[in-house]
Image (cartoon, rainbow, N blue to C red):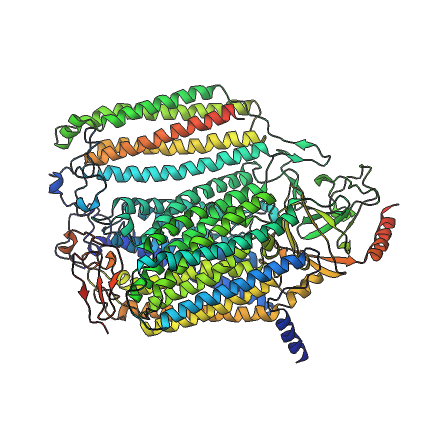
Amino acid sequence: MAATITPIDSERDRKRRLEDHDHGSGRRPPNDKNDKRTGGGDDGDNWNNRPQGRRGPREKLGRYRLAIFFALAGDLMFFIAIVSAFFVSQASGRYDAYNNYINQWLPTTVPPILWLNTATLIISSATIEIARRRMFQETHAMEEWLGIGKPTSKRAIPWLTATIVLGLLFLTGQWLAWNQLHLQRVFMRTNPSSHFFFLITGVHAVHLFLGIAALMAALIGLYRSRQLENRQILVDCSAWYWHSMGIFWLFLFTLLAFFQ
Amino acid sequence: MTPQPGTPISNPSAIIPKRARRVFTTDHHTIGIQYLILALVSVIIGTTLSLHMRIHLSWPQLNIERILPGSYLAIMTVHGTIMLFFVLTTAPQSGFGNLILPAQIGARRMALPLINALSFWLTALALVILCSSAFTDAGSPLSGWTAYPPLSAVASAGPGQGLGLDLWLFSIAIFGIAATMSSINTLVTIIRFRCEGMTWDRLPLTVWGWFTAALLSILAFSVLLAALVLLFCDRHAGTSFFIPTGNLVNGVIHSTSHPGNGSPLLWLHLFWFFGHPEVYIAILPGMGLTSMILANFSRRRVFAYRTMITTTLLIGLLGILVWGHHMFVAGLSPFATSAFSISSIAIAIPASAKVISWLATTWRSRPHYTTPMLFALGFVSLFITGGLTGPILAQPILDQYLHNTFFVVAHFHLIMAMSGIFGLFAATYYWFPLITATTTKPGRLMSEALGRWHFWTTLIGAYATFIPMHLTGLAGEPRHYSQLAGIPNAAGQLIANLRPLNSFITHAAIFLACAQIFFLVNLVKSLKNGAVAPQNPWHATTLEWHPSLATNSTVAASNEKIAVYRSPCEYMGPEPESFLTQWDTDSPIHSNRE
Amino acid sequence: MTHRSIHHAALLANPWNLPANASAHGPALDHHLLLNLWIALALLTLAHLILLIGILVRRRDAGPAPSAVWRIEYLPLAALAILFAALTVRAERLWADARYTGADPAALQVEVTGMQFAWYFHYPGSDATFGTTAPQFVAPGEGNPVGIDPTDPHSPDDFVTSELVLPANREVDLRLRAQDVIHGFSIPEMRLKQNAIPGQTVHIHFTPTIPGTYAILCTQLCGTGHFRMNANLRVLSPADFITWLASKQKAATP
């Protein structure tokens, strides 16, 4: 019934956009050669000269990228809030009953395995970038769009899988780091610094779980989704998310390792 | 029902039952209506709770607390949380945002339909979780919507601070995630889906309101989420972010086994960094709509259109720099207090600019007094009245006397709650034809006679309820007191002196709530039997009234290219009225209305 | 009937319903508050007059020309900005006087502790030094609600009351503390308000001027008993205060 309430819903009626060369397998997909020629013409911001419905092959991709960008901006604020709390807690002491200044912040020594984990995450960023670029290689993308096999997806799958494995390795490494600290009798509740160590690694791990879920969704999408454009968007957006989590981790790790 | 001719039949989700498809839809119009229904349910709950509080205060002998579960403070917490989050954030931003925003920028849908639907159902889930807290053993939390620790961090600090507060935390966290998703959708839609010719300075001011509010949502709700995570860890993971060392609650010393540098003030900073933008999220769309409605019925251009765009953004920007004014007497350093005081008073400048523009737009225009126009004028009046006490409260030396008195309650109820709700009423009366139209049925208008009754009774009720609160506040009556009788010591006399005024406030509040019956009757009547709305009944110029963007447009019309050629509100000349809609290519339409 | 007419007369004399002031800094604060309220009322009236005249007096035309934006929008805006700036400067100066500096070293010291749901007032006694307090010593049943350390040499002469007793015309330095949750320490007649935060000690100082009994309220939501968390402030003449202090001192010293 929803369909009859709004027959104008352009997403559901799967209307073929002939002006975008859609012959049944979706519109012309974006590729790494049409980067500079977006917006359905050579116009920059001139909306008056930009017919609706022809906003170029990167229109849908751009929309989802913008959405992921705003989501990541919000996420950045989330981490900024936690990092501010980190610095506030670190700097704040109190005077006890006998007028001694007390600051219970005992720096948590970062377990060495975190260096290994960081390296794993950097490598995983490289693998996902390779997978992402392979989705947009012009000749393969055009072949796939015309229905001659699925060369881009096939060439991206191994790298995507590698990223998932590396991500899981990173999370296992983090779990090992927590275990090592527990063996040293350092728990989340131990002191203000350990509160933040476990909190920061914990919320980052939750974000990586979401990232791995997104990568798996992209992987399933590569097998199941029928439109190349959708496959590209899935891989592209999860890649940007993954990169951001990598960069966030580098900052958080620097904070934990050098600014305690 | 049989599908309309021309309706695409090849629906991939054809296996899903029709009824479920109608409910779990990704169609922005339906989601908008679902949001409005959710807000209507919430506002009814919230109003009932506020009446309950007033009656409990004024006539304790009625023992009204037997009727609803939970104590006065629990009811106050749920009232605040529901009204702020589920009414004032949800209805303007997500409700009317979904219904009207795409059409106003010349688009036929929102950018991310699936995210949109998901965000609605998460919001509904959050509401259910919040309400469920009332039915736990100890009831809802009693720490207010601001949940200051350690009251909120230690479960033994009061009834409802255990499971009740956990449910509150989950509810607000889920709501925050949903609101962020909805805001991302709004932003992407506005940036990417504007039709041909819809440049940024041609965007209607309502769209600017939604845009700024969405930007604020993304910044603010993330910080709230971080604060909620920290609070949750304090409650359940043994940390002490907010619990200071040696905190003795109910005879038990907390946070000595795991000593910390915890500071309750850290929560205040994080919470108000979210909380202050939050109140602008609630009011900015209403400000934009008021500008457009005033211009529409005055048949004028909006005076100083670009200034209005700038001030909208400026209010948003300043809104994230003023959180400290909630903490003037909360232990903030006196120097930081001075800085926050200056930034807070600075907001008076863009807000005054808006008022001046509204006054200039209507100046000697003799507007058409339709119900939406009346509510927009009411918005201006309440915004002025509530706004003028803002600079008073922004002066720390005066806040030292007025903080947490009923003066503050009066201030924020007038400027946020009443203005916000007047904006929502204006939107409902104005856009009712677009809300009710379906492919098979035409849009309907609400009854003007009932609308006028509704407006005057609501305006009188609002002023009668909240103006006396300024006086009880100036006399020193604090907020959050669950009873006004039987208070020991000299304070008893101070509060007892105010009983006549408080009794008047309760009567006025009951009157204000009863006035809403006009609205509910009007709503029910007009849904079925309202006058059939003509195309563009208000002679508006914005795109939501474009014939082929209307919900009941034909399939053929839906393929029409939408383009915009001019700014909104191009009204010219006195009589006969002539105006150019945004999609008019050239000559003005001469109407012979009246 | 007489009660009502007295009420009306009071309303005329004090239209804004402020309670009587009994502090040294109060008159300046009241003056500034009343100035603000009258300005707000005047602006409210002015804006509503413009609104009403604007919508009731007929002259339908295209509205003010956009070129008039400087005259109509920015000129009044500049005037308002100057007005608000002037009020801010006045307010900040009063705030600086009240808060930027600490109390006079000769000021009377009292430690105020808020807990669910009572205020306690800890006087340092004859040695003018507070005995140390710690949460583990808190024992309301044994007459030690604020947790004074009995082993501390400064403790024995300290005494704790449940009403705040102060001499008139002498500055007092209050140390605000909270045991459990955030409380709000407020004395409307002293035009004073400051939150007490667990884990911190906040100083505020003021000078009561008029002897009498005043209400001390809690103004920060602190739990179910928030409404009944209050105490009395008794301001005595200096002579009466010395007598009161001596009697308390005597009771405290064994």
Which of C66 and B345 lies nearest the eye of the viewer? C66
Find residue A116 and report its image quarter.
Answer: top left
Q: Is residue B141 left or right of residue C131?
A: left
Image quadrant in which the C terminus of chain B is located? bottom left
Q: Is residue B517 visible?
A: no
Q: Residue at the location (85% across, 53% down)?
A: C242
Relative to residue C228, is residue A68 depicted above or below? above
Horizontal side of residue B120 vs A29, given as left or right? right
Identify which residue is drawn at 67% across, 49% down: C115
Of residue C44 and residue B491, the one placed in the foreground of this image is C44
The image position of residue B447, as x and y in percent, is 31, 71
At x 59%, y 27%, the residue is A106
Residue C251 at x, y = what percent?
86, 50
Left of B341 or right of it: where is C239?
right
- The quadrant in which residue B264 appears is top right
Above or below: residue A140 compared with residue A226: above
Q: Where B53 sits versus A193, above or below?
A: below
Question: How many numbered dots are placed on residues in this image?
Answer: 0
Question: Up-down: is C225 above or below C17?
Answer: above
Q: Position of residue A221 (x, y in %)?
A: 25, 34
Q: Is residue B574 visible?
A: yes
Task: State the residue in front, A98 or C23.
Answer: C23
Q: Where is residue B135 drawn, in percent x and y?
A: 50, 54
In the current view of this chain or complex, which residue is farthest to the bottom? Answer: C1
Tell me the quadrant of the picture where the N terminus of chain B can be found.
bottom left
